[in-house]
């Protein structure tokens, strides 16, 4: 089904008041925006309407209706049986009230009985509290008449008429009308809007239920406000009334929105209650056309998370293809998990063994935990040839890098296709089992030429390939145990990371690949990518496998990011984990590979820097940018960055393409090599290059005689 089948309306307010907020809401898949005119000024309306128009979210004009509200009372605790004088708006209502009428204030928070109406002309009533509660300013009041009288109120207030004039000038296409009581009210609104707005009639009072047929016939859409409706009929009857409204609207082909109490707990909390989840899921199953968030997005602490929860529930109910509401799917459509408890010591003991190099041990673990999804093992000939020739697996799925298991010929001779082989670590302990499907040889020069585009012996990848063993083994693997490492607690699996993202209600996550200690331009790129792409969070994922001379040892990369997590990153918006792999030296192909792996972790976006995964001068600096344009079926989106420099005048970092004519004299930049030399001399790099707290980590380690850089 189309993801747009279940619509989402958000209410704007202090929690969603600027352009960035609205852009992120739009990216989240919000369909409409509104403001609550009962709690907003005309200036508020103009502000939010202008923002919605600028960002491109259709606006729903929402009337306050002429409803009864308390005056400017402040916040007063009223005791049971206490007598007070009360002002109401509009004042004309006072003349219609009689002794014995009950006033339900703010969803039954306070119930008052009219005791004396003699001061009505002066704008006051004398009332007595039936039970205690808070009396607050501008709260809705429902009248339970002692004589069954219906208080007559106009459908549109003066502020509503003013708002309609503005809405017509700005081309607003929808109006949600509060306190519709009868079909004639819809006619009046149709006339006031000159037939230019689709009318969403709010069913929120008992009188509307009595005239439901006529209201539904004359309206374009219906909105059930369960909170206000619950003030006039018992809470137990709201569910039954909701079913009646759904049935009548379906009969006449009119869409129905539901508002109120959807995710109210998330005003304060990060997660909804089970009751809220079940309620929303049931509404979706019942065929609701749209869901309307109110305080959750207007004043709540978690407006974006609320939208994410709705989108996830819509998806789970089968009403969406998940474009906005879920994490991007794993590459190839399924997250591979090749771990098995079947292989105990007894079963492993009788298997032939092959001891893996450190790099192959990492490959085994990444295959088994799904980092290399859709691969389930080491490639056979067909997949290898297809990858080298077309950058795709034999199945047609994009895959840029060969993942192969090479063994000496003398060992391969003793292995038979169809048998299981124990793959062991440096201590000869089994890490995994290979279900050997194929043994084959491959021309290594052809392999290197097609993968790297060169046979130049100075290319590290070419040297790596030419040094491989002559026989390749293909087949699926089962992981028996993860290899022990110094930083294993940081090596989260895709399944674990996806769960972390899901628990935070993230759907858009930008991944960051690095093999260095963080410096300020990295930080600038990370934050800018999040902001520009409207992402919920950042996934920092440095490579800590085998390093080349001059690289930072993994310990210091991790410590630098620990400093960032503790002190500088925005709280709740960054997840840090490590990537146990090694460089393949494949330039643009490797850029694709690094992105695909992060997609498997749940990233929807991926930072591709200048000369990303470059190898000397073998590939143009923009090769890793351009390669993504060749594969439109890749679901993770590259976020491309070119040169980043520090501007002395601006006192901030600048992305070069955004300031093409920048004065060269104003630019500051130093290379990683220069920074390393400064560290080795005991000097502190400038603070615009690296945060002093991060520099201190490196300098302290060097002073202590630790080996910070790979030799």
Image (tube, helix red, strand yellow):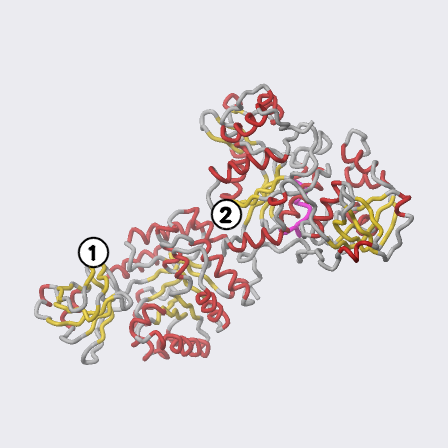
Residues at circles 1 and 2 in contact by the CB criterion of under 8 Å: no
Label 1: how many residues lie within 10 Å, few (<14), some (14-19) or many (20+)? few
Label 2: how many residues lie within 10 Å, few (<14), some (14-19) or many (20+)? many
Q: CA distance from mark 1 to mark 2?
A: 39 Å
User: Is 4 placed above or below 302 here?
Assistant: below
Residue matched to label 1: 74
User: Is 573 placed above or below 222 here?
Assistant: above
Which residue is at the front of the view, 75 or 451? 75
536 with respect to 547 (left or right): left
Say the numbered circle drawn on residue 593.
Answer: none
Residue 103 lies, in percent from the top left, at 21, 70
The N terminus: image quadrant: bottom right
User: Is 655 placed above or below 196 here?
Assistant: above
Which residue is at the front of the view, 525 or 186? 525
Extreme residue in the front direction: 346
Would you say residue 186 is visible in this rendering?
no
What residue sits 65% from the left and 36% below the top? 612
Residue 343 lies, in percent from the top left, at 75, 57
Say the numbered circle drawn on residue 534.
Answer: 2
Residue 506 lies, in percent from the top left, at 52, 53
Among the two numbered marks 1 and 2 on one chain, the one whose residue lies closer to the N terminus = 1
User: What is the secondary structure assignment of the residue under circle 2?
Assistant: loop
What residue sits 63% from the left and 47% below the top? 598
Which residue is at the front of the view, 568 or 381? 568
- Give the mark toward the camera: 1 or 2: 1
Stretch of the chain drawn in magenta = 625-635
437 with respect to 61 (left or right): right
Q: Quadrant of residue 448?
A: top right
The C terminus: image quadrant: top right
Does 473 lie within the magenta span? Answer: no
């Amino acid at each position: 089904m189309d993801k747009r089948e279940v619509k989402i309306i958000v209410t704007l307010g202090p929690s969603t008041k600027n352009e960035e907020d609205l852009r992120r809401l739009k990216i989240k898949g919000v369909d409409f925006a509104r403001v609550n005119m009962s709690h907003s000024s005309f200036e508020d309306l103009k502000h939010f309407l202008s923002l919605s128009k600028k960002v491109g979210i259709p606006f729903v004009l929402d009337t306050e209706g002429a409803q009864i509200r308390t005056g400017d009372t402040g916040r007063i605790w009223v005791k049971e049986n206490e007598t007070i004088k009360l002002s109401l708006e509009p004042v004309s209502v006072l003349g219609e009230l009689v002794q014995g009428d009950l006033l339900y204030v703010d969803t039954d928070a306070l119930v008052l009985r009219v005791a004396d109406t003699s001061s009505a002309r002066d704008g006051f009533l004398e009332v007595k509290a039936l039970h205690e509660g808070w009396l607050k300013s501008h709260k809705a009041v429902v009248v339970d008449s002692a004589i069954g009288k219906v208080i007559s109120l106009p459908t549109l207030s003066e502020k509503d008429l003013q708002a309609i004039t503005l809405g017509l000038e700005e081309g607003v296409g929808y109006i949600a009308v509060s306190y519709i009581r009868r079909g004639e009210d819809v006619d009046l609104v149709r006339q006031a809007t000159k037939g230019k707005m689709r009318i969403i009639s709010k069913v929120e009072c008992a009188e509307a239920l009595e005239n439901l047929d006529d209201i539904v016939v004359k309206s374009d859409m219906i909105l059930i406000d369960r909170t206000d409706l619950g003030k006039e009929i018992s809470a137990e009857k709201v569910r039954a009334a909701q079913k009646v409204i759904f049935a009548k609207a379906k009969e006449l082909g009119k869409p129905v929105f539901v508002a109120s109490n959807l995710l109210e707990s998330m005003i304060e909390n990060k997660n909804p209650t089970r009751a809220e989840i079940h309620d929303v899921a049931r509404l979706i199953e019942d065929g609701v056309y749209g869901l309307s968030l109110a305080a959750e997005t207007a004043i709540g602490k978690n407006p974006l998370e609320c939208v994410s929860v709705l989108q996830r529930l819509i998806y789970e109910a089968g009403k969406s293809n998940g474009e906005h509401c879920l994490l991007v799917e794993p590459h190839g459509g399924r997250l591979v998990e090749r771990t098995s408890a079947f292989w105990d010591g007894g079963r492993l003991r009788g298997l032939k063994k092959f001891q893996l190099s450190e790099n192959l041990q990492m490959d085994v673990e990444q295959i088994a935990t799904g980092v290399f999804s859709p691969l389930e093992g080491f490639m056979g000939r067909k997949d290898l040839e297809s990858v080298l020739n077309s950058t795709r697996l034999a199945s047609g799925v994009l895959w840029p890098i060969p993942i192969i298991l090479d063994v000496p010929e003398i060992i391969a001779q003793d292995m038979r296709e169809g048998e299981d082989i124990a793959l062991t670590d440096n201590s000869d302990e089994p890490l995994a089992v290979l279900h050997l499907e194929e043994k084959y040889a491959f021309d290594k020069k052809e392999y290197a030429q097609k993968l790297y585009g060169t046979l130049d012996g100075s290319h590290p990848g070419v040297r790596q390939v030419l040094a491989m063993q002559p026989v390749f083994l293909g087949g699926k693997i089962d992981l028996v145990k993860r290899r022990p490492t110094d930083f294993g607690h940081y090596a989260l699996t895709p399944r674990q990371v996806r769960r972390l993202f899901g628990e935070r209600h993230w759907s858009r996550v930008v991944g960051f690949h690095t093999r260095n200690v963080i410096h300020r331009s990295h930080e600038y790129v990370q934050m800018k990518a999040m902001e520009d792409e409207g992402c919920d969070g950042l996934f920092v994922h440095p490579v800590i496998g085998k390093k080349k001379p001059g690289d930072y040892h993994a310990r210091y990369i991790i410590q630098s990011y620990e400093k960032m997590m503790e002190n500088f990153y925005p709280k709740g918006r960054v997840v840090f984990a490590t990537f146990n792999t090694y460089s393949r030296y494949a330039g643009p192909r490797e850029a694709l590979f690094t992105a695909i792996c992060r997609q498997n972790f749940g990233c929807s976006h991926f930072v591709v820097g200048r000369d990303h995964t470059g190898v000397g001068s073998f590939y143009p600096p923009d090769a890793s940018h351009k390669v993504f344009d060749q594969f439109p079926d890749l679901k993770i989106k590259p976020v491309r960055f070119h040169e980043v420099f520090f501007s002395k005048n601006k006192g901030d970092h600048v992305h070069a393409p955004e300031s093409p004519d920048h004065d060269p004299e104003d630019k500051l930049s130093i290379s990683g090599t220069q920074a390393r030399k400064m560290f080795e001399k005991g000097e502190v790099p400038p603070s615009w290059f690296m945060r002093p707290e991060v520099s201190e980590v490196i300098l302290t380690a060097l002073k202590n005689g630790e080996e910070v850089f790979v030799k």
